[in-house]
Image (cartoon, rainbow, N blue to C red):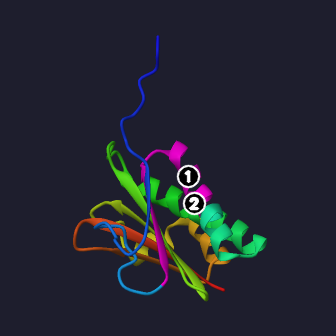
Amino acid sequence: MSEKHDPHIVAAMTGPERPRGAGLSGGAGDVVLLSIPSKPEYVGLSRLAVAGVARVSDLPEEAVADLKLAVTEACTFALQHVQGQRDACLAVGFRVTPHSWVIDVTWPSGNPGGDAALADGGLGLAVMRALVDGVDLESSFDGRSLLRLTKQL
C-alpha cells in the first residue's frame, strides 16, 4: 500500500516581491522567502536555506552554525504556537545585507502573548538570544505572529 503524501507545496522565492504575511517589509538587501508546512519534519529546510544563502554571502562558518541553530529554534517556537492549525504554513524570510542578516518567521495565530510569550519562551528563546543580536516577537493586524532574529556582521 502506498503512503499518501501531503499536498503542500514548498516554495522558495528571491527578489523584491514579498508575499503578504512573509515579514521583511521595507529595507534594503537581498530577500529569500521559504514557505513550509507547519510540521516538524520540514524545519530542516529552513536550516538548508540558511546554508544556501550563506554560501552566496560569504558568511563565516561560525556565524552560519549560529544562524542555523537560531532558525531551527525559531521555527520550533512557531510550531508550538500554531497549535492544531493543520493546514497552516510557516513563512521564513531572510534579508541579507553586507552588515546584517534579518530572519523573520511568521505563522498564523491570534496573539502568542507578545512580550509575555517571550518571557515564557523557555530554553529555545534563551538559545536564540545567545546566538543572535536581536530577538523580537510581535503580532500583526492580519492575525499572523512574527519572530524576528537579527544578526549583525
User: Where does the image place residue 72, in percent across and percent down from the top left?
Assistant: 59, 59
Viewer-proximal residue among 29 and 125: 29
Viewer-proximal residue among 39 and 16: 16
Q: Which residues are magenta?
A: 29-49
Amino acid type shown at disc 1: Leu
In the rendered image, residue 104 lying in the magenta stretch gets the answer no
Corner quadrant of residue 133: bottom right
Corner quadrant of residue 91: bottom left
In the rendered image, residue 35 lying in the magenta stretch gets the answer yes
How many discs appear? 2
Residue at x-position 41% and y-position 24%? 4
User: Where does the image place residue 130, in percent across and percent down from the top left?
Assistant: 67, 76
- CA–CA distance in space, label 2 to label 1: 6 Å
Location of mark 2 (residue): 49
Location of mark 1 (residue): 45
Q: Are marks 2 and 1 in contact (CB under 8 Å)?
A: yes
